[in-house]
Image (tube, rainbow, N blue to C red):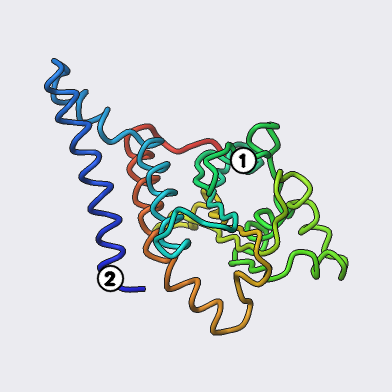
């Protein structure tokens, strides 16, 4: 992935936030409140999901296939979808049903359990092989997931154990959209790593303001 794509995404996030700050301030909101309003964590995270979606879709929102990006946050002892972007702009089914994933449950739960990226090139093939954790993910979705990847996200600390905060998921209705080969995994990592770092930065900033999240 070229550096300019990452910088373009980050620039857009900053520009949109700056616009919200200036708009709020022009409407009479004091400077401190305007800054808080412009850089609200949920808004920035939602915009970031859109940026990841845009890059993964090849900079094309008018897709014939279905593609979705979600970030599941750890709350208590479970993962909940909190931020998302997809082809049809529909709320994820698991989110609408209020379904959370436990450690080890579904592909996201496996990424949490293993503390490693989990790539499923062909969901149907894995289900036929008896991968029940894949079936657990697929059964909660409105559309047919054919290929997906889940990436655990942690906040790094120099003097203590890293803090697990959630899982970034990307799934497609096209079989083998992702590859579990060495080259395929490397390709995913190169594209996604900068965005994972932005997620870490946003979540770390939220913790500084609000204190650690539950879990």
Give the image quarter of residue 100: top right
Looking at the picture, does residue 33 appear above or below residue 183? above
Quadrant into which the C terminus falls: top right
Say which element carries label 1. loop
Q: Which residue is mark 2?
A: 3
Cα distance between the residues tagged 1 and 2: 30 Å
Residue 109 place in picture, x, y as percent: 68, 53
Disc 2: CA contacts within 10 A as few (<14), some (14-19) or many (>=20) = few
Q: Which residue is at the front of the view, 24 or 163?
A: 24
Disc 1: CA contacts within 10 A as few (<14), some (14-19) or many (>=20) = many
Q: Residue at x 38, y 59 (%)?
A: 197
Q: Is residue 28 visible?
A: yes
Q: Which residue is mark 1?
A: 92
Residue 126 place in picture, x, y as percent: 80, 68
Residue farthest to the top? 28
Residue 32 located left or right of residue 114: left
Give the image quarter of residue 176: bottom right
Q: Residue at x 80, y 70 (%)?
A: 125
Q: Which residue is at the front of the view, 177 or 39?
A: 177
Looking at the picture, does residue 12 appear above or below residue 181? above
Q: Is residue 159 visible?
A: no
Quadrant into which the N terminus falls: bottom left
Residue 92 place in picture, x, y as percent: 62, 40
Q: Which residue is at the front of the view, 197 or 140?
A: 140
Q: Residue at x 40, y 57 (%)?
A: 157
Q: Earlier along the polypeptide chain: callout 1 or callout 2?
A: 2
Say which mark, if any, is on residue 206: none
Say which element carries label 2. helix
Q: Residue at x 58, y 41 (%)?
A: 81
């Amino acid at each position: 992935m070229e550096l300019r794509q990452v910088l373009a995404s980050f620039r857009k996030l900053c520009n949109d936030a700056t616009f919200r700050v200036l708009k709020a301030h022009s409407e009479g909101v004091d400077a401190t409140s305007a800054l808080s309003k412009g850089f609200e964590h949920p808004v920035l995270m939602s915009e970031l999901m859109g940026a990841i979606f845009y890059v993964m879709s090849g900079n094309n929102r008018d897709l014939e296939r279905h593609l979705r990006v979600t970030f599941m946050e750890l709350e208590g002892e479970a993962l909940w979808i909190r931020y998302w972007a997809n082809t049809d702009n529909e709320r994820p089914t698991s989110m609408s049903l209020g379904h959370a994933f436990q450690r080890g449950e579904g592909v996201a739960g496996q990424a949490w359990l293993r503390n490693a990226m989990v790539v499923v090139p062909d969901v149907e093939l894995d289900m036929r092989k008896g991968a029940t954790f894949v079936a657990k993910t697929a059964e909660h979705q409105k559309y047919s997931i054919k290929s997906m990847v889940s990436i655990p996200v942690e906040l790094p600390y120099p003097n203590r154990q890293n803090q697990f905060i959630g899982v970034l998921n990307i799934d497609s209705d096209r079989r083998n959209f992702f590859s579990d080969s060495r080259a395929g995994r490397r390709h995913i990592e190169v594209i996604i790593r900068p965005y994972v770092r932005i997620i870490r930065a946003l979540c770390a900033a939220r913790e500084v303001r609000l204190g650690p999240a539950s879990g």
